[in-house]
Amino acid sequence: MSTRFRMLLLAGVAVLVTSCSAHAPGSQSMQLPAETLLPPGATQITSPPDQRSDTCDANASLRPSAQPRPGEMPDGSTMAAILKRGTLRVGVDQNSFLFGYRNPADGQIEGFDIDIAREIARDVFGDPARVELHPLDSAHRLTALQGKQVDIVVETLTPTCERRQSIEFSSAYFVSDQRLLVPKNSGIKSSADLAGKKVCGVVGTITLNPILALPQRPTVIGMSNWLDCLTALQQGQVDAASTDAPILYGLLQQDPNLRMVGDALAQDPYAVGVQQETKDLVRFVNGVLERIRGDGTWQRLYNNELAALGPTPGPPAPRYIG
């Protein structure tokens, strides 16, 4: 080897070593600022997005009227317009395992909420397949209804008095407890252990409220969907996630290193969201829910989609006004 070649080789190695040492773990250039540790779109939540209040009976809905036969909707009704269009436009989730999620095998959105939507389409058209599914993140469920982008929303949506100022709700079709999801080795056993911790939730959901109301409030991180919360948990960017137990169960099925802990923080009924001006559609949807409660359909759908949650007391009883 010539002296010139040997000198060039040593110079190259020196440059490589210098370059590597400049980016070695623990060096100043590799320390990322704290705000970059969360996925894009994450935000810190400091105030409740929707106050639970007793200014109304949030879970009461309009009493169903006589149910028309499928394919024979009353002239001038909202259902007649949907029948003429040919599809029922439904806002749904595609990231909530068990309720509304995209099946990786075929790319189709399925789950308990999707089945409820198809039962409504069945009673409009006589065909449960006549649905047009519109995936929405939680923060845009109400605006999609207000903007008439969808006819209904079936997306683990809980009625509140504040939400009732802008949309209508059906009677409840499911009731869930809110819990905590944490890594098994976290040491967190209940909400009392959350002081100084980071808790993940989804922007626009009322399940953020009980966390923000804790005496020693943790840092609440808002994501756009629950899969982002799962990723943040797996990467140690948050210490816990909190929402309704069935949704957390779906995340748990994707990572057995997690566990649900603590007593129920709240109880949340799910109802179908409807445009505020289409009250005839509210009564129609309640008629569909009456049918599936009474003819065994609700239990069949539960067994098909939610049996992993364990035995059920059955569908929640409706509460009507007007």
Image (cartoon, rainbow, N blue to C red):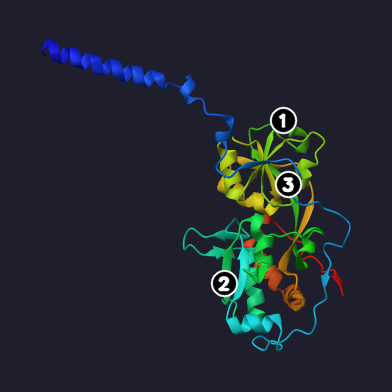
Residue for point 39% across, 18% down: 21
Residue under the image location 66 percent in, 53 percent down: 247
> How far from the left and from the top, in percent, is residue 47?
76, 43
Q: Earlier in the sequence, mark 1 or mark 3?
A: 1
Of residues 100 and 322, which is closer to you in this image?
322
Q: CA distance from mark 2 to mark 1?
A: 44 Å
What residue sits right under mark 3 in the picture?
208
Quadrant of the image occupied by residue 300: bottom right
The image's mark for residue 317 is none
What residue is rendered at 27% in x and 17% in y?
Answer: 13
Residue 308 visible, this orientation: no
Task: Determine whether, in the image, residue 71 is placed left or right of residue 22.
Answer: right
> Quarter holding the N terminus?
top left
Image: 24 above or below 98: above
Q: Is residue 169 left or right of residue 147?
A: right
Q: Are marks 1 and 3 in contact (CB under 8 Å)?
A: no
Q: Position of residue 49 (x, y in %)?
A: 74, 49
* Mark nearer the N terminus (2 vs 1): 2
Which residue was labeled with disc 2? 132
295 lies left or right of 86: right
| Vertical position of residue 47 compared to residue 87: above or below | above
Above or below: residue 71 compared with residue 105: below
The kind of secondary structure element at disc 1 is loop
Residue 208 vs residue 278, the one in the foreground: 278
Judged from this view, the residue extending furthest toward the front is: 147
76 or 39: nearer the eye? Answer: 76
Is there CB contact under 8 Å for labels 3 and 2? no
* Mark 3 or 2, nearer chain start: 2
The residue wearing badge 1 is 196
At x 58%, y 74%, the residue is 131
* Relative depth, front residue between 257 and 133: 133
Q: Is the residue 321 above or below the residue 245 in the image?
A: below
